[in-house]
Amino acid sequence: MSDKRQRARVQGSWAKQVPKHSGAAGPKVAVPNNHQPKDANTASGSWGFGSQQTSKNFEFHQPSKPIREVPQEKVIEKTGDYEISHGPSGVSRLRLLSGFLPPEEADWMFSKLLAELPWSQKTNYRQGEAYEEPRLTCWYGELPYTYAHSTMAANTQWHPLLLTLRLAVEQASGCSFNSLLCNLYRDGHDSIGWHSDDEASLGSKPVIASLSLGDTRVFSLRKQPPPEDNGDYTYVERIRVPLTHGTLLLMEGATQDDWQHQVAKEYHDRGPRINLTFRTIYPEPEGHRPGTKIRFTSKQP
Ligand SMILES: O=C(O)CCC(=O)C(=O)O
């Protein structure tokens, strides 16, 4: 290759050839000898091109906004009580009871509920557009349940196994529940998007008891961003809780005010999973639009 072609072409003229090992670290720039930085504190970047020479100094300015770090996601997988935040609405608490159901019991309960519950796919609405939820559900209680602009009629005749499980969950949690949302994730492609269980019909600071059967899925939580972040979740705290066969998870206190949760899709093999979320539903006041959120987030697919 000719000497000329080996040189870099810069701004319409051929720059001087740079020695291969200049010794300095970092990206190399052709700096003529008579334009070396004068002082170590000034990052001086100058390029001279024959007769048209320019000189520019680059100074370091402290960024006006503090540098924010994305907090590392926490993992909760051991049985215990976890205060996951304090404020702005009070204490948010998770209580995890791994192995709440012994595996052999959880096995036959899973098979029975899979075969005998009236599973169906609900149609929700977002901005007037209908979409099918990516999972199957059924709803038990005295009252219908409205979210995502569609209402689930209540199955008032509880399956006997669900009554047994409700009693066990009430004894463990010290709370009573009048309703149950059953979710069936047929495989890893079924999911539930980011949302809070904060419909007005659930009352203030609801306790939600979530019992998992079948394959493990990751239950994720993310903190609501402060108002000044305008709905940007980049810097919020995150927690992941792998929910295994027979595990009971209680969400208490301000968890539905200050956090959102989801079960994301997974793209490796996942078997079916049933999740039973026991709740208490209150009648909506007269003239109140069913499904109204306390905070204006909406249950996603
Ligand atoms: O499947 C789960 O663990 C979560 C279900 C859930 O978030 C819900 O029913 O609101």
Image (cartoon, grey):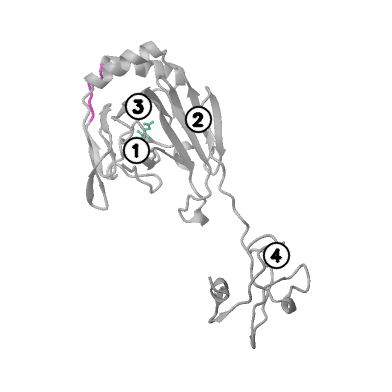
Could you tell me how far apart the alpha carbons at marks 2 and 3 are, in whole angstroms?
17 Å
Seen at 32% across and 26% down, the residue is 271
- Tell me if I can see residue 164 in this picture: no
- The image shows residue 195 at horizontal and vertical percentages of 39, 42
Which circle's residue, 2 or 4, is located before the other in the chain?
A: 4
Q: Nearer the viewer, mark 1 or mark 2?
A: 1
- Tell me if I can see residue 203 in this picture: yes
The residue at which mark 1 appears reads as 192
The residue at which mark 2 appears reads as 94
Q: Residues within 10 Å of mark 4 (few under 14, many from 20)?
A: few
Quadrant of the rendering where the C terminus is positioned: top left
Seen at 41% across and 15% down, the residue is 101
Whether 147 is drawn above or below 10: the answer is above
**Which span is picked out in magenta?**
154-159
Q: Nearer the viewer, mark 2 or mark 3?
A: 3
The residue at which mark 4 appears reads as 22
The residue at which mark 3 appears reads as 275
Q: Secondary structure at mark 1?
A: strand
Question: Disc 4 marks which amino acid?
Answer: Ser
Q: Nearer the viewer, mark 1 or mark 4?
A: 4
Determine if the C-beta at disc 2 is less than 8 A from ligand 1.
no
User: Residue 243: which quarter of the image?
Assistant: top left
Could you tell me how far apart the alpha carbons at marks 3 and 4 are, in whole angstroms?
63 Å
